[in-house]
Amino acid sequence: MRFLILSIILTVAAVSGAKDIQKTNINTAPADSLAAHLPGIGPTVAERIVTERKDGRFADCADVQSRVKGIGAKKLAKLCLNLEF
């Protein structure tokens, strides 16, 4: 499953020219910044991210998906292009 997710992320990155994307650190950004800068992330999911990271830093995109309700494979593919850890 992780291989499939990473394959999707790499494919989207290659097609979209991900080098020009400004990244947001999911482990440090406040909820309002997450909601403003991450595609498909609204205030509710942003708050879930902030709440979940209190239990520990996110290691990678698959970790985010497994720990935060409301982030599926399609959203994850778009989201991970914009994240740094």
Image (cartoon, rainbow, N blue to C red):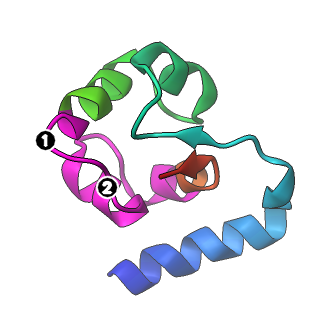
Q: Which residues are magenta?
A: 52-77
Q: Is residue 9 left or right of residue 11?
A: left
Residue that appears at 47% across and 54% down: 76
Question: Residue 12, located in which quarter of the rendered image?
Answer: bottom right
Quarter of the image with the N terminus in it:
bottom left
Q: Residues within 10 Å of mark 2 (few under 14, many from 20)?
A: some
Which label belongs to residue 65?
Answer: 2
Q: Amino acid at mark 2?
A: Gln
Residues marked 2 and 1 touching at CB (< 8 Å):
no
Question: Residue 69, located in which quarter of the rendered image?
Answer: top left
Residue 33 in the magenta stretch? The answer is no
Q: Which of 50 and 66 lies nearest the eye of the viewer?
A: 50
Q: Position of residue 44 (x, y in %)?
A: 32, 20
Q: Position of residue 82 (x, y in %)?
A: 63, 47
* Callout 2 secondary element: helix
Which label belongs to residue 74?
Answer: none
Q: Which tag, 2 or 1, sits closer to the chain's start?
A: 1
Q: Judge whether 1 appears above or below 52 on screen.
A: below
Q: Which residue in the rendered view is the most extreme toward the left?
A: 55
Q: Which residue is identified by label 1?
A: 55
Q: Which of 21 and 5 lies nearest the eye of the viewer?
A: 21
Q: Residues within 10 Å of mark 1 (few under 14, many from 20)?
A: few
